[in-house]
Image (cartoon, rainbow, N blue to C red):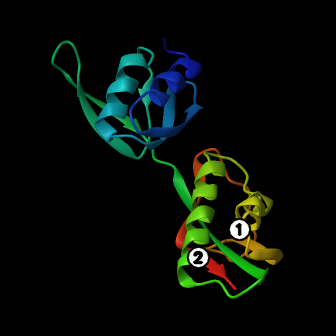
Amino acid sequence: ASTVDAILSRLKQVPQVEAVYVKENTRSFEAIVKGGKDQDIANTIWQCKPLGVETTGTVECTITDSLDAARKIRFSRPTDVPLTLRINLKVKRRLEEAELNKLKTALVDCGKTYFSLGSEVYASRFYASVLKEPLILDIITLQLRDRAIGNAPGEIKPEQIASLAFKDISIE
């Protein structure tokens, strides 16, 4: 019940948890958890962590054990890597604001589908969401950039997750 795989499995069963990564060290481990409530995550870690092994992380919760002693459980939340998406399209006619908003919403949803802890990001994954709109004839350019540095996204580490917000999408 206390292996990395068991801890991953248990944490993924916590309501509203979307993703989990566990970094293992000699005498400690750190769970990086996206979604879920802090206390639910801490309770689950307490129930399946190995005896004598410390938990590390930036979020700290207090658990009361079976002897009514207060115990500190730590874990972390993923570091967000915000991206921007700039698209230049060839269209049959100028898209109305509602049509552009619908497309942006589809692109945000696409990002949520493909962006997970530590997963690489590929601009090509957005092509299908754009091209399924019948008014769009072609994609002239599609650039996905790291919002902080302005370059193409670099390596996404296991404790990081890429994100794309509606306001960070530009369509011409």
Q: Position of residue 116 (x, y in %)?
A: 62, 47
> Residue 99, labelled with which disc?
2
> Residue 51, labelled with which disc?
none
Residue 56 visible in the shown view: yes
Q: Can you tell which quarter of the image residue 99 is in?
A: bottom right
- Identify the residue at horizontal 62%, vertical 57% (top origin): 111
Front one among 136 and 14: 136
Horizontal relation, residue 162 to residue 143: left or right: left
Front one among 75 and 56: 75
Q: Can you tell which quarter of the image residue 41 is in?
A: top left
- Identify the residue at horizontal 52%, vertical 23% (top origin): 9
Give the amino acid at mark 2.
Answer: Glu
Give SS at disc 2. helix
Disc 2 to disc 1: CB gap under 8 Å: yes
Give SS at disc 1. loop
Horizontal relation, residue 23 to residue 88: left or right: left
Give the amino acid at mark 1.
Answer: Glu
Looking at the image, residue 130 lies above or below residue 57: below
Q: Position of residue 67 (x, y in %)?
A: 18, 13
Task: Report the residue marked by disc 1.
Answer: 133
Looking at the image, tell me whether mark 2 or mark 1 is earlier in sequence order.
Answer: 2
Mark 1 Cα shell of 10 Å, populated few (<14), some (14-19), many (≥20)? few
Q: Position of residue 74 (x, y in %)?
A: 38, 37
Quarter of the image where the C terminus is located:
bottom right
Q: CA distance from mark 2 to mark 1?
A: 9 Å
Looking at the image, residue 123 lies above or below residue 92: above
